[in-house]
Image (spheres, grey):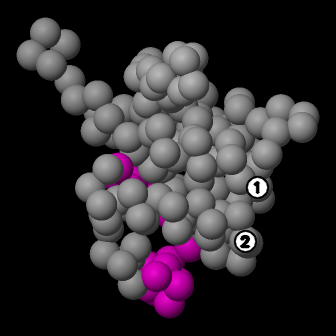
Amino acid sequence: MRFLLARSLWVSVSGDVFISHANEDKAAVVSPLADHLKAAGLEVWLDAFELRIGDSLRRKIDSGFAGSRFGVVVLSNSFFRKGWPQYELDGLITRYVSGEQNLLPIWHNITKDEVMAQSPSLADKIARNTAQYTIEEIAKEIADVVRPPTFDD
């Protein structure tokens, strides 16, 4: 966890993973993935964990991906149809292109051709597909990328 000085106050900045997704994918993929990542000791930014009544959605999301080193993007047809996931993806891509963050795509109920039709640059990224890997396997691989095993492990 990192801390930033903001107006003479130290505030925590969540540091590991921001999960971008469509709500339609939350029950099948996102919530179990977040639970596995947290069990692996990662700090996870997920709307369900962070948003409270009265919060500014845009500010909380901006803060979430600005403070995370990795952006996990759950790509699905629902993801590409909705505005907020596209807003999050824009921010994550901006941080990725500037070298501030790494993108870790997950494909859920979507084919490479469908991803290619929406975003050729995302289709080029190595992804994990929920049709081929379990959520637990995907979470373990993400945890290994975010916090690589040491020789003592």
Amino acid type at image mark 1: Asn
Most extreme residue toward the top is: 152
Left or right, 57 with respect to 139, comes to: right
Magenta segment boundaries in residue numbering: 101-119
Left or right, 88 with respect to 132, comes to: right
- Mark 1 burial class by Cα count in 10 Å: few <14, some 14-19, many 20+: some
Q: Measured from the top left, where is residue 89 in percent x and y?
A: 54, 64
In the rendered image, the vertical position of residue 51 relative to residue 4, given as above or below: below
Residue hosting label 2: 83
Closest to the camera, between mark 1 and mark 2, is 2
Amino acid type at image mark 2: Gly
* In the image, residue 152 lies in the stretch drawn in magenta: no
Query: Disc 1 and disc 2: Cα gap in Å?
Result: 12 Å
Residue hosting label 1: 23
Quarter of the picture holding the C terminus: top left
Q: Measured from the top left, where is residue 4 in percent x and y?
A: 46, 25
Quarter of the picture holding the N terminus: top left
- Label 2 sits on a secondary structure element that is helix
Of the numbered discs 1 and 2, the one sitting upstream in the chain is 1
Most extreme residue toward the left is: 151
